[in-house]
Structure formats: C-alpha cells, structure tokens
Amino acid sequence: MIKPDFEKTGGLVPVIAQDYKTGDVLMLAYMNEEAWKKTLETGKVHYYSRSRNKIWLKGESSGHVQLVKEIFLDCDLDTVLIKVDQLGGAACHKGYRSCFYRRLDGNELKIVGEKIFDPEVVYGKKA
C-alpha cells in the first residue's frame, strides 16, 4: 500500500487540508499511520492530536467533518495534502472557516476570515 513515510518523520506527517472547490487552505494538522488508515477506510479525515495523544475524527465534536475528495503525497512522501469537502463550513476550532483567518498587517494580526460559529456554544468555554 502506498503511504507516507512515517518512519522518516518520527511517526507523524504534516497534513494540509484544502477546500476542493475553492482551493482555500483550511488547516494544517498531523497524522500517524493509524489516522492515515482510518482516513482511507472511512473517507473522513482523521488526525493525530499531539496535545491529547490520540486519534480524532475532524468534526467529532462540532459536526464539521471533512470528507476526502483527493489525496496527494509530496515528492519525499513526508507531507500530505488532502482536498476535502468541509461539512458545516468551518474547519477551525475557533469558529472560522479556515485556521488561517488572520493576516499579518504590519505588526498586527488582522482578522480577515469568515466566522461560522461561536466556539463557546459548540464546545463550551474551553475553545
């Protein structure tokens, strides 16, 4: 089976999620081999949480699941690009469509992204 080179990267590879219709970059997260296999088996993107040390289905709490449309591996097999159908419209746990919702403007971060939901309503106070 073709897969990322998890051994070369210490067990985790970076994964870029991109909207398959617009080309917008939605987020960057990580996968281990188990998350890779679950993603291929289910057609829904699974990631590995470095802070919680566990596999998680994107959208398991919010319902904003990412459906796989296409998967690309880079030339070194150590980075993954997944083109997704982002259900619910938001990829970011802060409630924005993309995790890249702020642009550096001089010495400040300016919010330029679209906020889709209130994280306190979806997750409680922890977000």
Image (cartoon, rainbow, N blue to C red):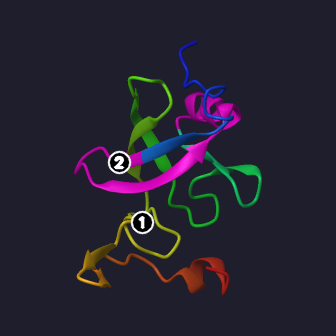
At horizontal 23% and vertical 82% (from top left) the residue drawn is: 106
As measured in the structure, the alpha-carbon distance from the residue carrying label 1 to the one carrying label 2 is: 11 Å
Determine crowd level at label 1: few under 14, some 14-19, many 20+ residues with C-alpha closer than 10 A. some
**Which residue is more in the foreground, 125 or 16?**
16
Residue pointed to by mark 2: 18
Q: Is residue 13 left or right of residue 86?
A: right
Q: Residue furthest front?
A: 107
Numbered circle sitting on residue 99: 1
Q: Is residue 84 left or right of residue 3?
A: left
Answer with mark 1 or mark 2, whichever residue precedes in sequence: 2
**Amino acid residing under circle 1:** Cys
Task: Specify whether residue 59 is painted magenta.
Answer: no
Per the rendered image, the range of residues in magenta is 17-43
**Which residue is more in the foreground, 82 or 14?**
14
Q: Is residue 119 above or below residue 51?
A: below
Specify the quadrant that holds the N terminus. top right
